[in-house]
Image (cartoon, grey):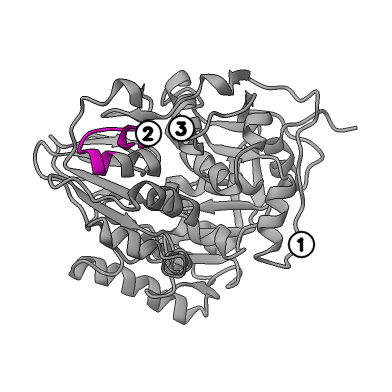
Amino acid sequence: MPKPMTMAEKILAAHAGLDEVVPGQLIECTLDGVLANDITAPPAIKVVDQIGAGVWDKDKIFLVPDHYAPNKDIKSAEQTKAMRDFARAHQITHYWETGCAGVEHALLPEQGIVVPGDLIIGADSHTCTYGGIGAFSTGVGSTDAGVGMATGKAWFKVPETIRIEVNGELAPGVSGKDVILHVIGLIGVDGALYQAMEFGGSGIEQLSVEGRLTIANMAIEAGGKAGLFEVDDKARAYVQARTSRPFTEYHPDPDASYARVLTIDAADIEPCVAWPHLPGNTHPVSESRHITIDQAVIGSCTNGRIEDMRAAAEVLRGRTVHPDVRCIILPATQAVWLQCVHEGLMDVFVEAHCAVSTPTCGPCLGGYMGILAAGERCISSTNRNFVGRMGDPTSEVYLASPAVAAASAVAGHIALPSDLD
């Protein structure tokens, strides 16, 4: 009889062909997919070429040009071309060209590429996003990604698990972004170092799948190896609307052993902002109104889904961006962009004097489409606010939900949507 296990332990055990695993154990697992983007794929491709055996499975390699695509300069064009040529040479099924692509971590769940119970590695730290639908997904370096592309296997050290229970009802206006910022504020940016973060409780059940994907996306900002949510009716409906591929649900055993259990009263969570220069430097919006801004960014793999676009549009409708502020909207995928058109959200954004981009990571990593000058401040729905993350080292990035970012764009300073009434 296997010992009681957490979600992470069950998924890893299944993919290692073992009845049970324990934290700290080194195991080799069979993968369900390997992801890379236009920055991380070229060095991974070199590893595949060095191994010399070709690719393990052309249907289980996912290549997404999203960081500097559409190409911003010659170097980025060369990187994307290397990935494109590799995809063509090996007949990779899941390569998305510009015009069909989007931000990788929004794209894969949206298109049903990842399903519950999968084990996915990606050469990007925010690969942990897919835990929002019950997969174990984690970021790796390009070397490990290249080995995975060639062999379909990767080694893992089984992580301990932190159980995070959010109980009660979230207040109106509190989003998944506020939940994860609150958690990181409590435990710090190394509070879950190489641990799986398993989320549950009635407050979590209240969230949409998109809200859960946002939380899982930022597990890495607490040092987490993965962020995991149990599959429920909402998650099943989300996945089954996108793929007919069968999947396996893994639920934690009631008596599973956790490194720590963190219990949070949902009523204690309010809209918040992470001040520079760490995602854990969180403060309530109500205590941040004195901070003026020069730019607002709404999008990214964290908050660029249609739910996020709707939240921003609800705030911006009938209003205009403050004359001292640039507001940049980045729908995360082509499907989200098109849905914004169908729902009239593009009209709202343009009439509010926002700049709307084709899907791309853009300014999130200091790529392009919104780089900050010296001393400028940006409020952003992205996931990191490290020194120089979005431009000049003396610039500042404040992390918030799309609704708060939109309200701040109108007010000219950090603000709640209710402040505009």
Q: Which numbered disc flags the more N-terminal residue, 2 or 3?
A: 3
Does residue 301 sit above or below 54 in this rendering?
Answer: above
Three-letter residue code for mark 3: Asp
Q: Position of residue 228 (x, y in %)?
A: 62, 39
- Residue 379 is marked as none
Is 296 on the left-hand or right-hand side of 89?
A: left
Q: Residue at x 31, y 40 (%)?
A: 407
For the N terminus, give its image quadrant. Answer: top right
Q: Position of residue 105 (x, y in %)?
A: 48, 55
SS assignment at label 2? helix
- Single out the mark in the foreground, 2 or 1: 2
Does residue 360 sit above or below 85 in this rendering?
Answer: above
Label 2 belongs to which residue? 418
For the C terminus, give its image quadrant. Answer: top left
Q: Which numbered disc flags the more N-terminal residue, 1 or 3?
A: 3
Is 364 on the left-hand or right-hand side of 190?
A: left
Q: Residue at x 62, y 18 (%)?
A: 263
Near-viewer residue (322 or 80): 322
Q: Position of residue 72 (x, y in %)?
A: 21, 66
SS assignment at label 3? helix
* Mark 2 vs mark 3, CA separation in Å: 16 Å
Q: Residue at x 12, y 44 (%)?
A: 324
Three-letter residue code for mark 2: Ser
Label 3 belongs to which residue? 178
Pointer 1 local density, CA inside 10 Å: few below 14, some 14–19, many at least 20: few
Which span is picked out in magenta? 408-421
Three-letter residue code for mark 1: Pro
Q: Which numbered disc flags the more N-terminal residue, 2 or 1?
A: 1
Does residue 286 sit above or below 349 in this rendering?
Answer: above
- Residue 246 is marked as 1
Q: Are marks 2 and 1 in contact (CB under 8 Å)?
A: no
- Single out the mark in the foreground, 1 or 3: 3
